[in-house]
Amino acid sequence: MADDLFGSFKPRGADWDTSDDNLIFISGPATDGLRTEVDDRAEFLRASLGLGPMRDKRVQHVTFSHFGHYGHIPDAIEAAREIGRAVAIKRSVIVFDQYRSYFHPEQNNPFALVASETPDAVKLANRELVKRVRRLGIDCPSGINPHVTLRYGQEVVSLTDMQPILWPVDELLLVMSRRGAQEHFIIDRWPAI
């Protein structure tokens, strides 16, 4: 992972603006072989659908639970760490067998690989993550839709089946992402059981 855009988290000063930062629980980053497979598929989809440039392949990951903007929560990072330590995720495989855009009227639309079914192990871990995040007063969505965002753009692409890509879930990571900057900082990680 030496060339990844996933950096190690280093606490910043109190004057660091966190208003556009998100805390997310993810699986990944992708291994080299998986990264190549996803990148090849992304390039094929870009060319065949007439899309613009894709995100840097070095930030490919599966988003599970979105902790959200956290600047208003005292000690949010440590609270998220405690949640990650408390939640066990079992090894599983997510089968990405579809792609689509998610329409957001006031911002760019994420274009992503999606799974028609979520493994039970991932559902159970997400249910526990959501329950614990809500105890902090954050209204995060209860459902889970594991996805790999390939790009943000104006186009809206309907849900379409594709040849599957298998993504092994072998760890859970807590990541801070800087919205719009393709910067991801690994705060902590826990191996799947």
Image (cartoon, rainbow, N blue to C red):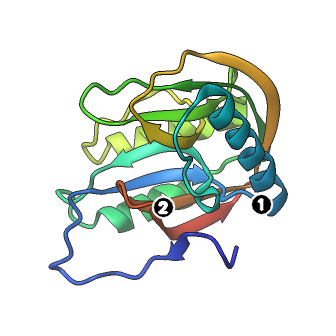
Q: Residue at x 51, y 60 (%)?
A: 174
Q: Secondary structure at mark 1?
A: loop
Position of residue 125 measured from the top left corner of the image (x, y, whole percent): 60, 41
Q: Judge whether 181 appears above or below 148 on screen.
A: below
Horizontal side of residue 164 vs 156, given as left or right: right
Q: Residue at x 24, y 31 (%)?
A: 106
- Circles 1 and 2: CB atoms closer than 8 Å: no
Relative depth, front residue between 16 and 32: 32
Q: Which residue is mark 2?
A: 175
Q: Residue type at mark 2?
A: Val
Q: Residue at x 54, y 51 (%)?
A: 55
Position of residue 99 measured from the top left corner of the image (x, y, whole percent): 63, 26
Q: Residue type at mark 1?
A: Thr
Horizontal side of residue 152 vs 77, given as left or right: right
Location of the N terminus by quadrant is bottom right
> Which is in the foreground here, disc 1 or disc 2?
1
In which image quadrant can residue 47 be found? top right
Q: Which residue is mark 1?
A: 31
Horizontal side of residue 109 vs 87, given as left or right: left
